[in-house]
Amino acid sequence: MKIATVTAPVATLWSRPDAPRPEVDAAALGPRCDPRSWVAGLDDTGRMYAGVLTQLLHGEQVLIEEVRDGWARVVATEQPAAKLDPRGYPGWLPLDQLSIRESPDSEQPDTGSLALAALEVARTWRGVPYVWGGLTPYGIDCSGLVHLAFRQVGVTLPRDADDQRAATADVPLGTERPGDLYFFARSNGKVHHVGFVTTAPTPDGHRHMLHACGDAYLVVEEGLRPTRTATLCAATRVTP
């Protein structure tokens, strides 16, 4: 048994792999599906199609029971449906809308590997618009990006940047490594921003990070500008 996390903006759960209608459901498929366009293209009859069972939100977890021809038969454990399956809602999802990992009772990777995996997840969000409080591929903020990236690799961190700082272990500046986190604070000491460390710092102290940037209004990977470095207050690491 494996578990997976939804990586598409919205994943539609289908009754069977051949349920999607080629002429009307293309926008609901694929890793960067566009559910708004899909719904806009449906007429009254199309919106009543029984081949659609439910929808799963980005970051939702499922159990995978079978994989076949690019599709996975899953149980959506966060959507109870006792009459169908006591574990959750059953149905089919395209594999390219999922991030798959082993079940919790299998051997787990070390936290360093998980942090690197979270960084790679976050890199897939480059170019997504910055939206304060956002937690979707239509708009996300700095702590939301960190929260979702780690959640996709099976690590639950708090939602807000100051709580993320408190939940992770400080490492001396200069010893940070890719997958660690940079935190930034105002003059009163309150943490207001977070980003992923993407490379080890250079001997002269130059640093790079990936973050949802309120200045660029995008998720970007970049070197720290002097104004950003001036507010750097900590580097931290996710620990068991």
Image: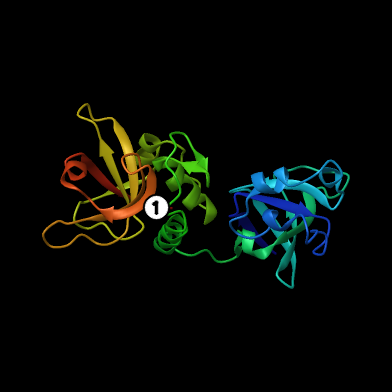
The residue type indicated by label 1 comes to: Thr
Report the label total: 1
Quadrant in which residue 179 is drawn: bottom left
Asked whether, in this view, residue 89 is left or right of residue 231, the answer is right
The answer to whether residue 237 is seen in the rendering is no
**134 up-or-down from 221: above or below:** above
Q: Residue at x 58, y 56 (%)?
A: 32
Q: Nearer the viewer, residue 51 or 57?
A: 51
Q: Secondary structure at mark 1?
A: loop
Q: Residue furthest bottom?
A: 69
Q: Nearer the viewer, residue 43 or 188?
A: 43
Q: Nearer the viewer, residue 236 or 142?
A: 142
From the image, tell me which residue sits under label 1: 239
| x and y, in percent, of residue 212 in the image | 38, 45
| x and y, in percent, of residue 159 in the image | 46, 38
**Which colouring convention does the figure follow?**
rainbow
